[in-house]
Amino acid sequence: MPPGGAEATREKLLAATHELLLERHAASASIADICSRAEVNVAMVKYCFDNKDGLLDALLERALQQLAGQLERLAALDADPKEKLRRHVSEIVRNYVRFPYVNRLMNERLMQADPESVARIGASFATPARAFYAQLLADGEASGMWRPLDPTLFFFSVVGVCEFLFAARPLLEQGFGQELDAALVERYSAHAAELVLGGMSAR
Amino acid sequence: MPPGGAEATREKLLAATHELLLERHAASASIADICSRAEVNVAMVKYCFDNKDGLLDALLERALQQLAGQLERLAALDADPKEKLRRHVSEIVRNYVRFPYVNRLMNERLMQADPESVARIGASFATPARAFYAQLLADGEASGMWRPLDPTLFFFSVVGVCEFLFAARPLLEQGFGQELDAALVERYSAHAAELVLGGMSAR
């Protein structure tokens, strides 16, 4: 293998898996499909990721790290807490569109409650998100704009508002006969931000 | 089999599965465990439910119908929309405590996106819930208390706020080191209701 070959193969496999899961609305893709798309020998999955679960874990990790990166940039922004939260809600919703498999992979891992996976999701997503909320809530409370809110409870409620539309997408599409298209995503993002921001107001 | 025997066996199996899933925090229970707890021959699972998935579907269905029953009683109540919604949020949260497996079973079936399961969840849960919200939102808007809100978007946001704490329970317990005990459930229920109700106010 050429120097850097394993790293390049890893990237190819992650990119191919991302593409396939996106095309298939997050339904599963087989190792054979992934390797054929990546133009990589199937043995490389074992070499780079141990197995398919390892590949999916790495894919989830990568998406969650992008999310954490967005939080850092948003935290550093010179904007008022309301504006930051509005942008943040819109970013979470958009992330579920860009990475439709994140929801499924995260829910699967949380349902299995495997300590190692939970630790990884905690470190790359839940802990940075709660820290971001803690700072934002403190800023908003200090300015007299928001009532006191618990960052832990806030984490579950904000992420819950944003994610359930995607987790329960079949209820929207089959149950209510509505498409999860760009227009609905826009409307939902605005609805979620207004609901949460309105609910935080100091009386 | 005595008359009514199949119905009684069905009930025993459902009750045993409910108990076992409750004791094990919604981790899975084997057919052998279930039948041993129900004191029923394993062949009866096939007779009553075809297979384990059929048994779990029936269990989910039963829990969702209880939920729909609560909605009907709440809708008929002579109370103002705010009070109804506050009680409703508290009921959803409490239901996730009483039936901790509902979340997992529903998410599993939604992830598989099997049209028949989705249709069942739609009919027994999503459609009655959205109808309840539509009436409530219309009443609250007519009284000048709430701004106009879309019942479909509202459905996903309210259920999302209530359910994610339970779906992501390992993040709370392992990630943040907090117990999902009665006190936290109370605090979460109050937090969720205040966030949603505050976010609905007409300006």
Image: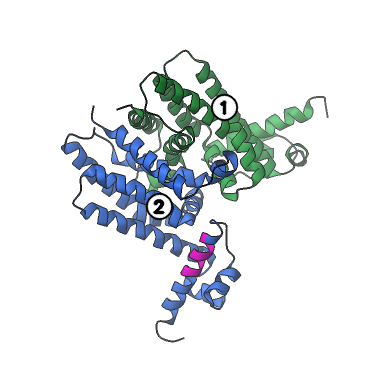
Chain colours: A blue, B green
Q: What is the chain letter for disc 1?
A: B
Question: Do tags 2 and 1 sit on the same chain?
Answer: no
Measured as percent of width and height from the top left, residue A150 is found at: 28, 37
Magenta highlight: main SS: helix
**At 64% across and 42% down in the image, what residue appears?**
B117
**At 60% across and 37% down in the image, what residue appears?**
B121
Residue A121 horizontal side relative to residue A86, left or right: right
Measured as percent of width and height from the top left, residue B180 is found at: 40, 37
**At 60% across and 29% down in the image, what residue appears?**
B65
Residue under circle 1?
B68
- The CA span between labels 2 and 1 is 32 Å
Residues at badges 2 and 1 in contact (C-beta under 8 Å)? no
Camera-near label (2 vs 1) is 2
Kind of element beneath mark 2: helix
Residue A30, above or below B178: below
| Amino acid type of the residue that numbered disc 1 sits on in the rendered structure | Ala
Task: Write the start and end of the magenta stretch as one range.
Answer: A15-22
| Amino acid type of the residue that numbered disc 2 sits on in the rendered structure | Arg
Question: Is residue A22 at all visible to an observer of this figure?
Answer: yes
Q: What is the chain letter for disc 2?
A: A
Kind of element beneath mark 1: helix
Residue under circle 2?
A94
Identify the residue at the far top of this view: B78
